[in-house]
Image (spheres, grey):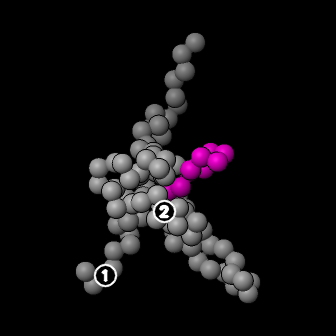
Amino acid sequence: MNYEPTNPTKFDRRLASVKDVQKLTGYQWATERYLRHLIFNAEDRYGSRGTIVPGNGLAPAIIRIGRKVLIDLDAFDAWIDGQRSEGV
């Protein structure tokens, strides 16, 4: 019995583990330590005084499967483009 995906475009995503991102061409600047920092700060969280600390907005590019953390590279590229300042 062959399995045919109902939505083949969903499987065309470029995914990479946190350790493998830096090995890819064009991502040498993204060290594992820096990516883990971005992932930790991706979502809103509560500060020590109960105030909400806003996240950096990277959450849509992060895929968690158990303990494995994958980066959707297309969403990561879009997030990077969104970080550009207006004055540049």
Q: Residue at x 36, y 48 (%)?
A: 23
* Residue identified by numbered label 2: 33
Mark earlier in primary sequence (2, 1): 2
- Is residue 65 one of those drawn in magenta? yes
- In-image side of 31 versus 42 (left or right): left
* Residue identified by numbered label 1: 86
Q: Residue furthest left?
A: 88
Position of the N terminus, as image quadrant, is top right
Stretch in magenta: 61-69
Predominant SS along the magenta part: strand
Picture layout, residue 1 above or below residue 46: above
Residue 75 in sight here: yes
Q: CA distance from mark 2 to mark 1?
A: 27 Å
Position of the C terminus, as image quadrant, is bottom left
- In-image side of 69 versus 12 (left or right): right
Q: Residue furthest bottom?
A: 49
Q: What kind of element bears circle 2?
A: helix
Q: Residue at x 49, y 35 (%)?
A: 7
The part of the image, by quadrant, that contains residue 48 is: bottom right
Mark closer to the observer (2, 1): 2
The residue closer to the viewer here, 72 or 2, is 72
What amino acid is found at the position of numbered circle 2 in the picture?
A: Arg
- Is residue 18 one of those drawn in magenta? no
